[in-house]
Image (cartoon, coloured by chain):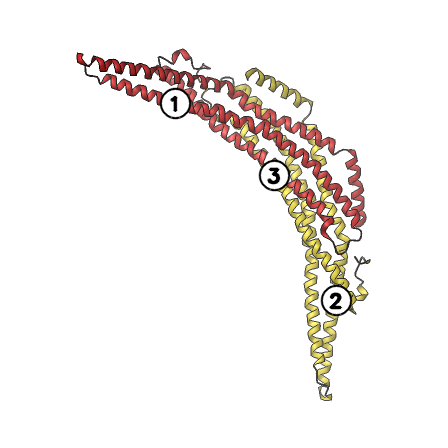
Chain colours: A red, B yellow
Amino acid sequence: MPAVDKLLLEEALQDSPQTRSLLSVFEEDAGTLTDYTNQLLQAMQRVYGAQNEMCLATQQLSKQLLAYEKQNFALGKGDEEVISTLHYFSKVVDELNVLHTELAKQLADTMVLPIIQFREKDLTEVSTLKDLFGLASNEHDLSMAKYSKLPKKKENEKVKTEVVKEVAAARRKQHLSSLQYYCALNALQYRKRVAMMEPMIGFAHGQINFFKRGAEMFNQSMDSFLSSVADMVQRSG
Amino acid sequence: MPAVDKLLLEEALQDSPQTRSLLSVFEEDAGTLTDYTNQLLQAMQRVYGAQNEMCLATQQLSKQLLAYEKQNFALGKGDEEVISTLHYFSKVVDELNVLHTELAKQLADTMVLPIIQFREKDLTEVSTLKDLFGLASNEHDLSMAKYSKLPKKKENEKVKTEVVKEVAAARRKQHLSSLQYYCALNALQYRKRVAMMEPMIGFAHGQINFFKRGAEMFNQSMDSFLSSVADMVQRSG
């Protein structure tokens, strides 16, 4: 593990083997980070998907509880008690659904979105600049090869001047693209730590809020309702 | 809606049109209850499925957070802080997973299982006894038809005695199966109220326990950890 934490921009112009070697370390790190980010995003999207499915499932359950009243049972004697109890449970499931929906939204906004943005913005930028740097390096290599193949004769002076100009332009272009690429790789190292921790802060805050509100919702009055329903069931059962 | 709440067993032997008509009301009710129970079971299984998926998703997320350390990043400078923070979050997700797993188990045992048992035991019993009652009624009708077709001649006295015996046996069989069928239909009316309410009591108790333990878990110390991580991110970001 090299004792450096950034690529020095002043090394970019010289483009020495040492600089290239250090660059490859940064590139390897960016590759590992991209793979890991994709796996982490997948795991987070699975949690979000489960949370979303819980919203839909509680919605369906609440509707189904209300639907008891509309069944037109041929024998409805004693059903008033069942209907009112299922109505109450439907309201409980609705309130729970509000909490689940809120948590799903929070997970989307503060867990999944930041890591998607990290991937789409930071990681994609590095990968794009890597491609541009590769193209510029190739162009530079080609113009260098052209220059080295020039015949040494005096009468080709004009052609030579043209090629020298071309080499200089290619070198400027490569230099510029390497500066941008180095900057992006340095910024990635800087962003990496935040990008890894930020989504889990969002996750934890979402859960804290969810449990706090849930504990308030399922309070004493729910307990006493439940024991009265349990009594009713005991009497019938 | 008839003002009766059960089929009278003493009417079963006479099997009058009035009794048959009342029976059809009980049968219609049982049919509606079967349809409704199947829909309710489906909605409850969806909630259980979502809860189970949440267990698997949190398990995967916890593993993925621990995996950061094992990525062999080419550049590991400053990673100790990230690694220890992700370890902490992995522990939080593990504890959350324990709560989710407990809730899933509770929903399986106290919500899904009772309604499955109601369907498999009570509703299936009614449906089986209905079939047996139908078969016995057919047999009785056939032996009655045989009896009515008997020639009136004296010399057939022995055959007649046989057929009369057959009719009596068929009537006894039909009577017995109608008694069992009536009992099951009466019991179903009795079980119906409990069967509809019991799973939701299980559901509510599971949620109460889940939120109570969750609120205890995400306590003050978690808040202070989160604000220290947020500070760290702020400094880096």
Mark 1 and mark 3 lie on one chain; the one further toward the N terminus is: 3
Amino acid found under the numbered disc labelled 2: Leu
Res B24 quadrant in image: bottom right
Q: Chain of mark 1?
A: A
Res B147 quadrant in image: bottom right
Image-based side of A168 in relation to A32, left or right: left
Q: Is B216 rendered above or below residue B25?
A: above
Amino acid found under the numbered disc labelled 3: Glu
Q: Position of residue B225 (x, y in %)?
A: 63, 20
Q: Residue at label 3? A: A53
Secondary structure type for disc 2? helix
Image-based side of A183 in relation to A232, left or right: left
Image-based side of A191 in relation to B216, left or right: left
Q: Residue at label 1? A: A132
Q: CA distance from mark 3 to mark 2?
A: 49 Å
Q: Quadrant of the N terminus of chain B?
A: bottom right
Residue at the front extreme of this rendering: A158
Amino acid found under the numbered disc labelled 1: Leu
Q: CA distance from mark 1 to mark 3?
A: 42 Å
Secondary structure type for disc 3? helix
Numbered mark located on residue B176 in the image: 2
Closer mark to the observer between disc 2 and disc 1: 1
The residue at the point 61 percent across, 36 percent down is A52
Residue A142 in view here:
yes
Closer mark to the observer between disc 1 and disc 3: 1
Q: CA distance from mark 2 to mark 1?
A: 89 Å
